[in-house]
Image (cartoon, rainbow, N blue to C red):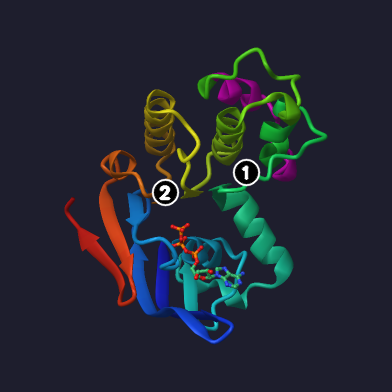
Amino acid sequence: MLELVNLGKSYGGRQVLSGLSHRFEAGEFVAIMGESGVGKSTLLNIIAGLDAPDSGQVLVDGQPMSALDDDAATRLRRSRMGFIFQAFHVLPHLTLLQNVALPLLLNGEPPARASSMLAAVGLGGRDNDFPRQLSGGELQRVAIARALVHRPALLLADEPTGNLDPETADGILQLLRAETRASGAGAIMVTHSHAAAAMADRILVLTRSGLKETTS
Ligand SMILES: Nc1ncnc2c1ncn2[C@@H]1O[C@H](COP(=O)(O)OP(=O)(O)OP(=O)(O)O)[C@@H](O)[C@H]1O
């Protein structure tokens, strides 16, 4: 469903991605690992359409993202993708419930599932709290609930368990797996954690020469 064709990206004359091609199948859970600074977040941002490649294409269901106008790209992201970013982008003036319900509201769907998603990430009963009342790990769990609430076809996650203790991280990873399996969603998860990567269907390592499959 998602294909990267010959992607190139540089910042200020420094080449980060070069000639990167890869095909992700629908419904597979893929972990991307690699050295700090190699371009993992850059790649995820390009897939998410938040950053543009200098060259090459991102194809979604065979269609180049670059061929979509801004409205169509926004609709595609909003309805088909879920995002968990390193900076959680939780909106401070909305309650936790309102934050999690946002993707449903933007897609014109009833917000019924938002409260149960908060409970699923261990924040049951805190619907009316505000983000300022939460720890970093709790905020991350709100971001995870929001990324999954509209059952996206593709989940993009940048270090989704980076701020969590090992036990909470394990619970969240199991939730990510269960939710994506239940809805047939694919996931691309950038992580430095071998424990997190171990639950993926495939582990890819990003190096200067591209994405390489690994068995460990
Ligand atoms: N907006 C930007 N402007 C300039 N340089 C950038 C920008 N975004 C990323 N870079 C540079 O691109 C390189 C790759 O960054 P990126 O965040 O993608 O790496 P990463 O593999 O995700 O690293 P980490 O594992 O440390 O999070 C880095 O050298 C970074 O400084």
Q: Hey, which residue is sitting farthest right in the picture?
A: 93
Tell how many labels: 2
Residue 31 is covered by the magenta coloring: no
Q: Furthest residue to the top?
A: 125
Can you give x and y, in whole percent of width and height, for residue 72 in the image? Answer: 68, 65
| Residue 143 image point, x, y percent | 60, 37
Q: CA distance from mark 2 to mark 1?
A: 17 Å
Q: Give the residues in magenta.
A: 105-119
Is 117 covered by the magenta stretch?
Answer: yes
Q: Nearer the viewer, residue 34 or 155?
A: 34
Identified by mark 2, the residue type is Ala
Give the mark toward the camera: 2 or 1. 1
Q: Magenta region's main secondary structure?
A: helix
- The residue shown at (52%, 24%) is 121
Q: Which mark is residue 88?
A: 1
What secondary structure is found at the residue carrying circle 1? loop
Q: Is residue 26 above or below residue 4?
A: above
Q: Where is residue 100, by image quadrant?
A: top right
In the rendered image, which residue does mark 2 sit on?
187
Residue 77 lies left or right of residue 55; in this view the side is: right
Whole-percent x and y of residue 68? 64, 72
Q: On the image, which quarter does residue 25 sit in?
A: bottom left
Residue 188, x across and y down, in percent: 41, 52
Residue positioned 34% across, 56% down in the render = 33
89 to the left or right of 119: right
Vertical position of residue 10 compared to residue 149: above or below: below
Q: Which one is nearer the viewer's eye here, 72 or 44? A: 44
The residue sitting at the left extreme is 215
